[in-house]
Image: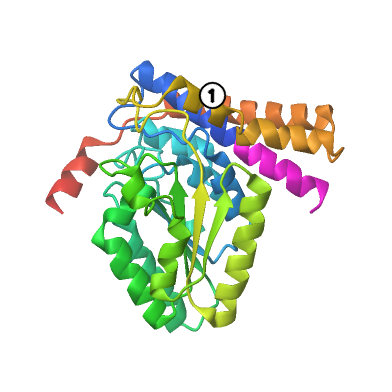
Protein backbone atom coordinates (compact mmCIF):
# COMPACT_ATOMS: atom_id res chain seq x y z
CA UNK A 1 0.00 0.00 0.00
CA UNK A 2 1.07 3.55 -0.69
CA UNK A 3 1.11 6.23 1.98
CA UNK A 4 -2.00 7.84 0.47
CA UNK A 5 -3.94 4.58 0.81
CA UNK A 6 -3.11 4.36 4.51
CA UNK A 7 -4.19 7.96 5.04
CA UNK A 8 -7.39 7.40 3.08
CA UNK A 9 -8.27 4.49 5.35
CA UNK A 10 -7.55 6.57 8.44
CA UNK A 11 -9.59 9.50 7.14
CA UNK A 12 -12.57 7.25 6.38
CA UNK A 13 -12.48 5.81 9.89
CA UNK A 14 -11.98 9.20 11.52
CA UNK A 15 -14.79 10.77 9.47
CA UNK A 16 -17.17 7.95 10.36
CA UNK A 17 -16.34 8.35 14.06
CA UNK A 18 -16.82 12.12 14.00
CA UNK A 19 -19.99 11.83 11.90
CA UNK A 20 -21.50 9.43 14.41
CA UNK A 21 -20.51 11.57 17.38
CA UNK A 22 -22.12 14.56 15.66
CA UNK A 23 -25.26 12.52 15.01
CA UNK A 24 -25.50 11.73 18.71
CA UNK A 25 -25.11 15.40 19.59
CA UNK A 26 -27.72 16.55 17.08
CA UNK A 27 -30.12 13.82 18.16
CA UNK A 28 -29.88 15.14 21.72
CA UNK A 29 -30.61 18.64 20.40
CA UNK A 30 -33.73 17.42 18.62
CA UNK A 31 -32.48 17.96 15.06
CA UNK A 32 -32.49 14.21 14.34
CA UNK A 33 -35.70 12.37 15.13
CA UNK A 34 -36.88 8.79 15.02
CA UNK A 35 -34.44 5.93 15.47
CA UNK A 36 -30.67 6.42 15.46
CA UNK A 37 -28.20 3.52 15.52
CA UNK A 38 -24.56 4.55 15.81
CA UNK A 39 -21.54 2.71 14.37
CA UNK A 40 -18.95 3.91 16.89
CA UNK A 41 -16.34 1.17 17.43
CA UNK A 42 -17.05 -0.67 14.18
CA UNK A 43 -15.40 1.78 11.76
CA UNK A 44 -12.64 -0.62 10.70
CA UNK A 45 -15.17 -2.97 9.11
CA UNK A 46 -16.77 -0.43 6.78
CA UNK A 47 -13.49 1.24 5.86
CA UNK A 48 -11.54 -1.98 5.40
CA UNK A 49 -14.11 -4.05 3.55
CA UNK A 50 -15.37 -1.39 1.15
CA UNK A 51 -11.90 -0.14 0.14
CA UNK A 52 -11.27 -3.16 -2.18
CA UNK A 53 -14.61 -2.81 -4.02
CA UNK A 54 -15.05 -1.42 -7.52
CA UNK A 55 -17.61 1.16 -8.57
CA UNK A 56 -19.75 -1.49 -10.28
CA UNK A 57 -19.95 -3.64 -7.14
CA UNK A 58 -23.14 -3.49 -5.06
CA UNK A 59 -23.52 -2.81 -1.34
CA UNK A 60 -26.63 -3.66 0.67
CA UNK A 61 -26.67 -3.16 4.42
CA UNK A 62 -28.67 -2.93 7.63
CA UNK A 63 -30.03 0.02 9.59
CA UNK A 64 -26.65 0.83 11.21
CA UNK A 65 -25.68 2.14 7.78
CA UNK A 66 -23.93 5.51 8.19
CA UNK A 67 -20.44 4.00 8.25
CA UNK A 68 -20.95 1.97 5.10
CA UNK A 69 -22.36 4.99 3.27
CA UNK A 70 -19.38 7.18 4.18
CA UNK A 71 -16.88 4.43 3.33
CA UNK A 72 -18.57 4.06 -0.06
CA UNK A 73 -18.02 7.75 -0.73
CA UNK A 74 -21.51 9.21 -0.31
CA UNK A 75 -21.32 12.93 0.42
CA UNK A 76 -21.62 13.74 4.10
CA UNK A 77 -23.80 16.83 3.47
CA UNK A 78 -26.72 14.94 1.88
CA UNK A 79 -26.22 12.13 4.41
CA UNK A 80 -26.56 14.48 7.36
CA UNK A 81 -29.46 16.24 5.66
CA UNK A 82 -31.25 12.89 5.39
CA UNK A 83 -30.85 12.33 9.12
CA UNK A 84 -32.20 15.85 9.68
CA UNK A 85 -35.22 14.96 7.52
CA UNK A 86 -34.40 17.60 4.91
CA UNK A 87 -35.31 17.74 1.22
CA UNK A 88 -31.64 17.67 0.20
CA UNK A 89 -31.08 14.33 1.92
CA UNK A 90 -30.00 11.26 -0.07
CA UNK A 91 -33.53 9.88 0.27
CA UNK A 92 -35.27 13.24 0.09
CA UNK A 93 -35.56 13.44 3.85
CA UNK A 94 -38.16 10.66 3.88
CA UNK A 95 -36.01 7.70 4.86
CA UNK A 96 -34.01 8.98 7.80
CA UNK A 97 -31.14 7.26 9.55
CA UNK A 98 -32.02 3.69 8.57
CA UNK A 99 -32.66 4.20 4.85
CA UNK A 100 -29.64 5.79 3.19
CA UNK A 101 -29.54 5.16 -0.57
CA UNK A 102 -27.45 6.24 -3.54
CA UNK A 103 -28.05 4.14 -6.65
CA UNK A 104 -25.43 6.15 -8.56
CA UNK A 105 -22.80 4.54 -6.31
CA UNK A 106 -24.54 1.14 -6.25
CA UNK A 107 -25.21 1.74 -2.57
CA UNK A 108 -28.55 -0.01 -2.39
CA UNK A 109 -29.55 1.11 1.00
CA UNK A 110 -29.83 0.51 4.66
CA UNK A 111 -32.83 -1.65 5.60
CA UNK A 112 -34.72 -1.44 8.88
CA UNK A 113 -36.15 -4.96 9.03
CA UNK A 114 -33.61 -7.38 10.50
CA UNK A 115 -32.37 -9.72 7.77
CA UNK A 116 -34.53 -8.19 5.02
CA UNK A 117 -31.51 -6.96 3.08
CA UNK A 118 -30.04 -10.45 2.66
CA UNK A 119 -32.40 -11.83 -0.04
CA UNK A 120 -32.40 -8.43 -1.76
CA UNK A 121 -28.63 -8.66 -2.07
CA UNK A 122 -28.99 -12.07 -3.67
CA UNK A 123 -31.14 -10.41 -6.31
CA UNK A 124 -28.39 -7.96 -7.22
CA UNK A 125 -25.86 -10.80 -7.36
CA UNK A 126 -28.19 -12.82 -9.59
CA UNK A 127 -28.53 -9.82 -11.93
CA UNK A 128 -24.74 -9.54 -12.23
CA UNK A 129 -24.48 -13.25 -12.94
CA UNK A 130 -27.31 -13.14 -15.51
CA UNK A 131 -25.67 -10.21 -17.31
CA UNK A 132 -22.33 -12.08 -17.27
CA UNK A 133 -20.60 -9.33 -15.29
CA UNK A 134 -17.87 -9.97 -12.73
CA UNK A 135 -19.26 -7.41 -10.26
CA UNK A 136 -19.77 -8.58 -6.68
CA UNK A 137 -22.49 -7.81 -4.15
CA UNK A 138 -21.55 -7.38 -0.48
CA UNK A 139 -24.33 -7.66 2.08
CA UNK A 140 -23.77 -6.62 5.70
CA UNK A 141 -25.82 -7.89 8.63
CA UNK A 142 -25.53 -8.27 12.38
CA UNK A 143 -25.45 -11.38 14.54
CA UNK A 144 -29.15 -10.98 15.30
CA UNK A 145 -29.98 -11.56 11.62
CA UNK A 146 -28.66 -15.13 11.77
CA UNK A 147 -31.87 -16.08 13.60
CA UNK A 148 -33.92 -15.04 10.57
CA UNK A 149 -35.02 -17.58 7.99
CA UNK A 150 -33.95 -15.21 5.22
CA UNK A 151 -30.32 -15.66 6.27
CA UNK A 152 -30.30 -19.44 5.92
CA UNK A 153 -32.53 -19.52 2.85
CA UNK A 154 -30.38 -16.99 0.98
CA UNK A 155 -27.12 -18.69 1.99
CA UNK A 156 -28.49 -21.95 0.62
CA UNK A 157 -29.75 -20.46 -2.64
CA UNK A 158 -26.56 -18.45 -3.21
CA UNK A 159 -24.49 -21.61 -2.81
CA UNK A 160 -26.67 -23.66 -5.16
CA UNK A 161 -26.58 -20.95 -7.84
CA UNK A 162 -22.97 -19.94 -7.13
CA UNK A 163 -23.94 -16.30 -6.87
CA UNK A 164 -21.20 -13.62 -6.79
CA UNK A 165 -22.03 -12.46 -3.27
CA UNK A 166 -20.08 -11.86 -0.07
CA UNK A 167 -22.04 -12.37 3.15
CA UNK A 168 -20.45 -10.08 5.73
CA UNK A 169 -21.43 -10.64 9.36
CA UNK A 170 -20.64 -7.81 11.79
CA UNK A 171 -20.68 -9.75 15.05
CA UNK A 172 -20.80 -7.33 17.99
CA UNK A 173 -22.01 -10.13 20.32
CA UNK A 174 -25.23 -8.37 21.27
CA UNK A 175 -27.79 -9.31 18.62
CA UNK A 176 -31.20 -7.95 19.58
CA UNK A 177 -33.58 -10.66 20.79
CA UNK A 178 -30.99 -13.44 20.66
CA UNK A 179 -28.83 -15.43 23.03
CA UNK A 180 -25.12 -14.95 22.43
CA UNK A 181 -24.34 -18.54 23.43
CA UNK A 182 -26.96 -19.95 21.11
CA UNK A 183 -26.12 -17.90 18.04
CA UNK A 184 -22.39 -18.56 18.46
CA UNK A 185 -23.08 -22.30 18.62
CA UNK A 186 -21.61 -22.76 22.11
CA UNK A 187 -18.49 -20.76 21.41
CA UNK A 188 -17.83 -21.87 17.85
CA UNK A 189 -17.37 -19.19 15.25
CA UNK A 190 -20.15 -18.22 12.89
CA UNK A 191 -17.67 -18.97 10.15
CA UNK A 192 -18.48 -22.67 10.64
CA UNK A 193 -22.04 -22.02 9.55
CA UNK A 194 -20.96 -21.37 5.98
CA UNK A 195 -19.67 -24.93 5.72
CA UNK A 196 -23.27 -26.09 5.92
CA UNK A 197 -23.89 -24.32 2.63
CA UNK A 198 -20.72 -25.34 0.83
CA UNK A 199 -19.03 -21.94 0.88
CA UNK A 200 -15.76 -20.78 2.45
CA UNK A 201 -16.03 -18.97 5.77
CA UNK A 202 -13.43 -16.75 7.42
CA UNK A 203 -13.24 -15.04 10.81
CA UNK A 204 -11.37 -11.75 11.06
CA UNK A 205 -10.61 -9.23 13.79
CA UNK A 206 -13.12 -6.49 12.96
CA UNK A 207 -11.15 -3.97 15.04
CA UNK A 208 -8.15 -4.25 12.69
CA UNK A 209 -8.77 -2.30 9.48
CA UNK A 210 -5.81 -3.82 7.61
CA UNK A 211 -6.86 -7.37 8.51
CA UNK A 212 -10.40 -6.64 7.34
CA UNK A 213 -9.14 -5.16 4.07
CA UNK A 214 -6.82 -8.08 3.33
CA UNK A 215 -9.45 -10.70 4.17
CA UNK A 216 -12.04 -8.97 2.00
CA UNK A 217 -9.63 -8.63 -0.91
CA UNK A 218 -8.96 -12.37 -0.85
CA UNK A 219 -12.67 -13.23 -0.72
CA UNK A 220 -13.59 -10.80 -3.50
CA UNK A 221 -10.83 -12.15 -5.75
CA UNK A 222 -12.18 -15.70 -5.43
CA UNK A 223 -15.77 -14.61 -6.00
CA UNK A 224 -14.82 -12.72 -9.17
CA UNK A 225 -13.11 -15.84 -10.47
CA UNK A 226 -16.49 -17.60 -10.47
CA UNK A 227 -16.02 -19.76 -7.38
CA UNK A 228 -19.35 -18.68 -5.90
CA UNK A 229 -20.30 -16.97 -2.63
CA UNK A 230 -18.14 -16.45 0.46
CA UNK A 231 -18.76 -15.62 4.11
CA UNK A 232 -16.79 -13.36 6.46
CA UNK A 233 -17.43 -12.91 10.16
CA UNK A 234 -15.83 -9.82 11.68
CA UNK A 235 -15.75 -9.76 15.48
CA UNK A 236 -16.31 -6.23 16.72
CA UNK A 237 -17.93 -4.15 19.43
CA UNK A 238 -20.13 -1.07 19.30
CA UNK A 239 -19.36 1.37 22.09
CA UNK A 240 -22.90 2.75 22.19
CA UNK A 241 -26.10 0.90 22.97
CA UNK A 242 -28.24 -0.68 20.28
CA UNK A 243 -29.76 2.74 19.55
CA UNK A 244 -29.93 6.15 21.21
CA UNK A 245 -32.89 4.82 23.17
CA UNK A 246 -30.76 2.03 24.68
CA UNK A 247 -28.63 2.92 27.74
CA UNK A 248 -26.70 -0.39 27.35
CA UNK A 249 -26.79 -1.13 31.08
CA UNK A 250 -26.54 -4.87 30.35
CA UNK A 251 -22.81 -4.52 29.55
CA UNK A 252 -20.24 -4.26 32.34
CA UNK A 253 -17.72 -1.44 32.58
CA UNK A 254 -14.98 -4.08 32.53
CA UNK A 255 -16.15 -5.47 29.19
CA UNK A 256 -16.46 -2.02 27.68
CA UNK A 257 -12.98 -1.00 28.90
CA UNK A 258 -11.43 -4.16 27.45
CA UNK A 259 -12.90 -3.45 24.03
CA UNK A 260 -11.91 0.21 24.15
CA UNK A 261 -8.30 -0.93 24.39
CA UNK A 262 -8.90 -2.37 20.90
CA UNK A 263 -10.31 0.90 19.54
CA UNK A 264 -9.75 0.61 15.76
CA UNK A 265 -9.15 4.31 15.21
CA UNK A 266 -6.67 4.81 18.06
CA UNK A 267 -4.73 1.62 17.33
CA UNK A 268 -4.52 2.25 13.58
CA UNK A 269 -3.14 5.71 14.32
CA UNK A 270 -0.54 4.17 16.64
CA UNK A 271 0.39 1.65 13.95
CA UNK A 272 0.86 4.28 11.26
CA UNK A 273 3.04 6.45 13.50
CA UNK A 274 4.91 3.55 15.09
CA UNK A 275 5.87 2.11 11.69
CA UNK A 276 6.82 5.59 10.42
CA UNK A 277 4.31 5.21 7.58
CA UNK A 278 3.00 8.71 8.24
CA UNK A 279 3.86 11.67 10.46
CA UNK A 280 1.89 13.50 13.14
CA UNK A 281 1.53 16.33 10.63
CA UNK A 282 -0.04 13.93 8.09
CA UNK A 283 -2.55 12.72 10.68
CA UNK A 284 -3.40 16.26 11.80
CA UNK A 285 -3.93 17.38 8.21
CA UNK A 286 -6.29 14.48 7.46
CA UNK A 287 -8.18 14.95 10.73
CA UNK A 288 -8.60 18.68 10.14
CA UNK A 289 -9.89 18.02 6.62
CA UNK A 290 -12.46 15.57 7.97
CA UNK A 291 -13.50 17.98 10.75
CA UNK A 292 -14.03 20.75 8.20
CA UNK A 293 -16.06 18.43 6.00
CA UNK A 294 -18.26 17.45 8.93
CA UNK A 295 -18.82 21.07 9.96
CA UNK A 296 -19.92 21.86 6.42
CA UNK A 297 -22.21 18.82 6.43
CA UNK A 298 -24.00 19.96 9.59
CA UNK A 299 -24.27 23.49 8.20
CA UNK A 300 -25.69 22.12 4.94
CA UNK A 301 -28.25 20.00 6.79
CA UNK A 302 -29.27 22.83 9.12
CA UNK A 303 -29.81 25.31 6.30
CA UNK A 304 -31.54 22.89 3.91
CA UNK A 305 -35.33 23.15 3.36
CA UNK A 306 -37.91 20.70 4.65
CA UNK A 307 -39.55 18.32 2.14
CA UNK A 308 -42.52 19.80 0.26
CA UNK A 309 -45.92 18.77 1.60
CA UNK A 310 -47.09 18.10 -1.95
CA UNK A 311 -44.28 15.58 -2.39
CA UNK A 312 -45.37 13.76 0.75
CA UNK A 313 -48.99 13.66 -0.45
CA UNK A 314 -47.88 12.30 -3.81
CA UNK A 315 -45.92 9.55 -2.07
CA UNK A 316 -48.90 8.57 0.06
CA UNK A 317 -51.37 8.41 -2.80
CA UNK A 318 -49.04 7.15 -5.52
Q: Which residue is mark 1?
A: 257
Image vertical order of residue 142 relative to residue 301, above or below: below
Would you say residue 139 is visible in this rendering? no
Image vertical order of residue 188 relative to residue 176, above or below: below
Residue 6 sits inside the magenta stretch: yes
Q: Residue at the location (68% across, 39% down)?
A: 10
The quadrant in which the C terminus is found is bottom left
The spot of residue 162 in percent (x, y) is 44, 80
The spot of residue 239 in percent (x, y) is 47, 29
Image vertical order of residue 204 relative to residue 217, above or below: above
The spot of residue 179 in percent (x, y) is 30, 43
Q: Nearer the viewer, residue 188 or 82?
A: 188
Q: Residue at the location (53% across, 34% down)?
A: 41
Q: Nearer the viewer, residue 157 or 22?
A: 157
Q: Quadrant of residue 36?
A: top left
Label 1 Cα neighbours within 10 Å, binned few <14 / some 14-19 / many ≥20: few
Q: Is residue 178 left or right of residue 287?
A: left
- Counting the numbered discs, the total is 1
Identify the coloring: rainbow
Q: Is residue 68 left or right of residue 307?
A: right
Q: Is residue 291 left or right of residue 127?
A: right
Q: Nearer the viewer, residue 176 or 112?
A: 176
Residue range corresponding to the magenta coloring = 1-13
- Identify the residue at the far top of this view: 29
The quadrant in which the N terminus is found is bottom right
Q: Quadrant of residue 295?
A: top right
Our reading of the magenta stretch's main secondary structure is: helix
Q: Residue at the location (76% across, 37% down)?
A: 271
Q: Residue at the location (61% across, 50% down)?
A: 48
- Identify the residue at the far front of this view: 186
Amino acid sequence: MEKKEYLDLYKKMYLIRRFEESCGENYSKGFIRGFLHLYIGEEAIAAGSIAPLREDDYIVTHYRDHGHAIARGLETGPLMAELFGKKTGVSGGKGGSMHLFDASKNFMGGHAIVGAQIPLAAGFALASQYQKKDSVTVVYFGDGATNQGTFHETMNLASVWKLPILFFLENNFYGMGTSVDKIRNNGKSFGNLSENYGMPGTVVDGMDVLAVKETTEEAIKKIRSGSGPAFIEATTFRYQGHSMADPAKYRTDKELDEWKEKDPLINFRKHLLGQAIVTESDIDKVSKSADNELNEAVKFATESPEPDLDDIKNDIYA
